[in-house]
């Protein structure tokens, strides 16, 4: 990636994340209240992930699952729909709360990640960051996934979210190899359409 284009990408990330955090403040507060009133605390889920160059950081999402979701996960591993690799995905995850299901449908649970974008740990667009527990099982060649900043949205997310781990990696590497500001804008527009139509899951 060219340094000047990366500079423009960072400026864009800064401006958009700051503007959205300001404009969406009432929405963020409303979501926080909805979670608190229906399922109590915590309101935010601490997201332990791996960022640029393999550096771990803590991101945040609105909590969409029951409080003990990580413990229950062990009993659900046999239902994993992601073929191959260390990633765990279930379409109809029984750990998701009623409010959480609605938040996920429109990707509203992801909004706190705008703070990570503002702080420079993430970008608006880039490969989705792997969990620390997932990254520990990456093969060496798969670590190229973290050779760029992770993003709130990605090529994988606007490509139907294929359930093959190899397809996910292929799309991430395709993004890394062919990155441009135009590609970022295209992915953002497609993401907006997916979110508005509720076809995220």
Image: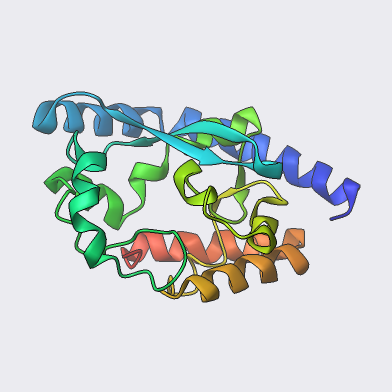
Question: Residue at the left extreme?
Answer: 38
Q: How is the image coloured?
A: rainbow
Left or right of 183: which side holds 85?
left
Residue at 26% x, 41% y: name it: 70
Looking at the image, can residue 91 be seen? no
Q: Which x, y percent locates residue 153?
A: 52, 55
Q: Which x, y percent locates residue 130?
A: 51, 50
Q: Which x, y percent locates residue 136?
A: 53, 47
Number of residue marks: 0
The one of 94 and 63 positioned closer to us in this rendering: 94
The one of 105 and 89 positioned closer to us in this rendering: 89
- In which quarter of the view is residue 138 placed? bottom right
Q: Which x, y percent locates residue 1?
A: 84, 56
Looking at the image, can residue 148 be seen? yes
Left or right of 44: which side holds 192?
right
The quarter of the rendered structure image containing the C terminus is bottom left
- In which quarter of the view is residue 62 placed? top left
Residue at 51% x, 36% y: name it: 114
Residue at 45% x, 75% y: name it: 164
On screen, residue 28 above or below 144: above
On screen, residue 49 above or below 157: above
Residue at 26% x, 34% y: name it: 31
């Amino acid at each position: 990636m060219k340094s000047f284009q990366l500079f423009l990408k960072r400026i864009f990330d800064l401006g958009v994340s700051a503007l959205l955090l300001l404009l969406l403040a009432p929405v963020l507060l409303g979501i926080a209240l909805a979670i608190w009133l229906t399922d109590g605390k915590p309101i935010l889920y601490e997201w332990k992930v791996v960022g640029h160059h393999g550096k771990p950081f803590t991101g945040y999402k609105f909590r969409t699952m029951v409080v003990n979701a990580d413990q229950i996960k062990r009993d659900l591993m046999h239902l994993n729909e992601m073929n191959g690799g260390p990633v765990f995905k279930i379409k109809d995850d029984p750990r998701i709360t009623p409010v959480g299901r609605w938040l996920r449908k429109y990707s509203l649970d992801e909004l706190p990640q705008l703070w990570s974008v503002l702080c420079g740990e993430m970008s608006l667009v880039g490969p989705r960051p792997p969990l620390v527990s997932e990254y520990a099982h990456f093969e060496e060649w798969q670590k190229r996934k973290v050779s760029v900043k992770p993003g709130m949205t990605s090529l994988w997310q606007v490509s139907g979210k294929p359930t093959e781990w190899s397809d996910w990696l292929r799309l991430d590497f395709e993004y890394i190899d062919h990155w441009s500001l135009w590609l970022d804008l295209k992915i953002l527009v497609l993401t907006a359409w997916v979110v508005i139509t509720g076809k995220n899951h």
